[in-house]
Amino acid sequence: MTKQRIALVTGANRGIGKEVARQLSHDHGLKVLVGSRDLERGQEAAHQIGHGADTLQLDVSDPTSVVAAFSRIEADYGRLEILVNNAGVDYDTDQQAHTADLARVHRAFETNLFGPWATTIAAVPLLKQGQNARIVNVSSGAGAFSGMSSGTPGYGISKAALNALTLKTAAELKSKRILVNAVCPGWVATDMGGGGRPVSEGAAGVVWAATLPDTGPTGGFFRDGQPIDW
């Protein structure tokens, strides 16, 4: 009997993360761990998702929380198949790079870059124990050098750094058959985005990257399953 695959989605108590968790669970039959900084909100989201979704208290910007979360995954399951680094903060449209509040930028980097970096480091030993392992970094066109313009300095530059992390880890883990890709969900109607297309459409591109076959791409940047410029 094939073991049920395990997926962790960070920042999954709402928005894109919650919808990614729902699609992975409902449409692909995965055991989904709803990573949430706030445990009660995570529990509520997991209950709404159903299909055996479970909650994992996880603040990606807190090293102690990261260690505790992955220790629990190891104890409960001994492996992980999919890591979706979705947690993100501060779409700072009110700032410009040449006048930015750098303390605020530092906070953005803690969640948008160092958070995914820490979870990736913690996850890799478990991903090596899983089957068809995948890492998906939820990025943004705001971090693409090809179209970068003024505004959102903390968010955009931290997402550009996340793209660089994607390339590095993809190259390093290719021999381990762990596919690593960045996905831009597009402008989506979430609390952070404030408008745009349905959340389900943005989440679908993330789920596509999380469920790629072994012959799928690695080290790429995608939107809706199509490559986009870095």
Image (cartoon, rainbow, N blue to C red):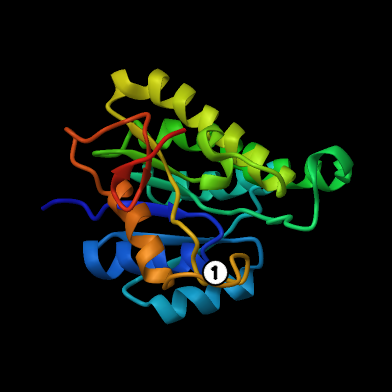
Q: Is residue 52 above or below residue 6?
A: below
Residue at 83% x, 48% y: name it: 104
Amino acid of disc 1: Asn
Q: Is residue 66 visible?
A: yes
Residue sitting at the far left: 1
Q: Position of residue 60 (x, y in %)?
A: 64, 48
Q: Position of residue 96 (x, y in %)?
A: 80, 46
Q: Is residue 161 above or below residue 159?
A: above
Q: Position of residue 169 (x, y in %)?
A: 45, 25
Label 1: state its secondary structure. loop
Q: Is residue 64 above or below residue 190?
A: above
Q: Position of residue 174 (x, y in %)?
A: 32, 22
Q: Nearer the viewer, residue 102 or 32?
A: 102
Residue at 47% x, 38% y: name it: 123
Q: Nearer the viewer, residue 58 or 168?
A: 168
Residue count near mark 1 (Cα–Cα under 10 Å), binned few <14, some 14–19, many ≥20: many
Report which residue position mark 1 lands on. Answer: 13
